[in-house]
Amino acid sequence: MYEDGELTWSVIPEQDSLYFAYFAPYSMERHADLIADAAASPLVQTSVLGHTLDGQDMDLVEVGYGSEGRKKIWLIARQHPGETMAEWWMEGALGFLLDEDNPVARQLLDKAHFYIVPNMNPDGSRRGDLRTNAAGANLNREWKDTTMDRSPEAYLVREKMQQTGVDFHLDVHGDEDLPYNFVAGFEGVPSVTDKQLQLLDRYQMTLCALSPDFQREQGYPVDAPGTANLEKCTDYTAETFGCLAMTLEMPFKDNADLPDEEWGWSPERCRYLAESCLGALAQMVDDLR
Ligand SMILES: [Zn+2]
């Protein structure tokens, strides 16, 4: 209850410990289970890109039949570790891709190879940070000039991207303020092309048609030409690889266009949104280049 500037709870706990959280937590134990469950699929190859400052693994999950001749799709989440909805989204994405009865996933994997980093910031996740890693760095301001001393998470993923190439990139986040799902693009990068902007428009249009939880009216102001911050992952990726790159933002509380009085925005809805995001990709995977 919120009254006179005080937020209070009245609860009879069923167990000796409980969480109070702005959004459903996503523990490192659950992250380990996510990686282990994915690794059991014949479609998956897991690897460790390197280690964080606290010595944790940077897990990469590759999904597909090999990258040769296929589009390279990068999905990353939780650069900001407190934005746990981003890893719930990843559960949905992996569930979708690994369902061998799903015809859309099967067709997509015929054409695309996936590089997935379900948790970009294991140290911040374990420490309970909202936005930073063990060195206090905001990883989404560390892409152009990243170093192993300060932001090994961004450094290691950037190295791998340079090896694989990138045809499509989605960086998944949550926004504390705006009660909507929306995409932020790369309009302000120096080398932006009409083709990239057309893909950005088409992706959002397609996702709107697939998910009532996605919209385009509300979002961040668009950068003026040439004013992008290339330390941000999406801008860095769009500029470096000339591809469609986007930041997906989800709400903490709810989607104001389709509110759920009891649960608000929830892990289940994150998973459904992930499925729609991959559905939208499936409709344009042939045209990414
Ligand atoms: Zn964020």
Image: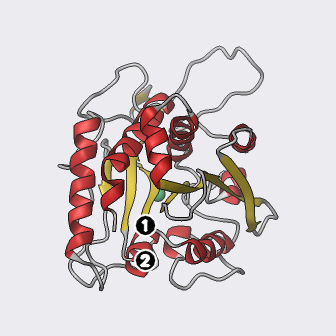
- Identify which residue, 166 or 27, lies in the foreground: 166
- Residue type (three-letter) at the residue carrying disc 2: Phe
Query: Residue at 54% of width from left, 76% of height from top?
Result: 142
Q: How is the image coloured?
A: secondary structure
Judge: label 1 CB < 8 Å from ligand 1.
Answer: no
Query: Of helix, strand and loop, which one carries label 2?
Result: helix
Which x, y percent locates residue 139? 56, 69
Residue at x 44%, y 25% (from the top left corner): 1
248 relative position to 267: left or right: left
The amino acid pointed to by label 1 is: Asp
Q: CB atoms at circles 2 and 1 under 8 Å apart?
A: yes
In-image side of 215 versus 79 (left or right): left
Quadrant location of the C terminus?
bottom left
Snapshot quadrant of residue 239: bottom left
The residue wearing badge 2 is 241
**Considering depth in this image, is 51 or 94 the residue closer to the camera?**
94
Task: Look at the image and tell me whether residue 16 can be seen.
Answer: yes
Looking at the image, is 72 positioned above or below residue 257?
below
Position in image of residue 198 (x %, y %): 20, 64
User: Which numbered marker is on residue 282?
Assistant: none
Q: Position of residue 64 (x, y in %)?
A: 58, 50
| Image position, residue 156 (x, y; %) | 66, 73
**How many residues crowd around disc 1 within 10 Å: few (fewer than 14), some, or many (20 or more)?**
many
Residue wearing tag 1: 167
Determine which quarter of the picture holds residue 99: top right
**Residue at screen point 39% across, 33% down:** 4
Q: Is residue 222 visible?
A: no
57 and 95: which is toward the camera = 95
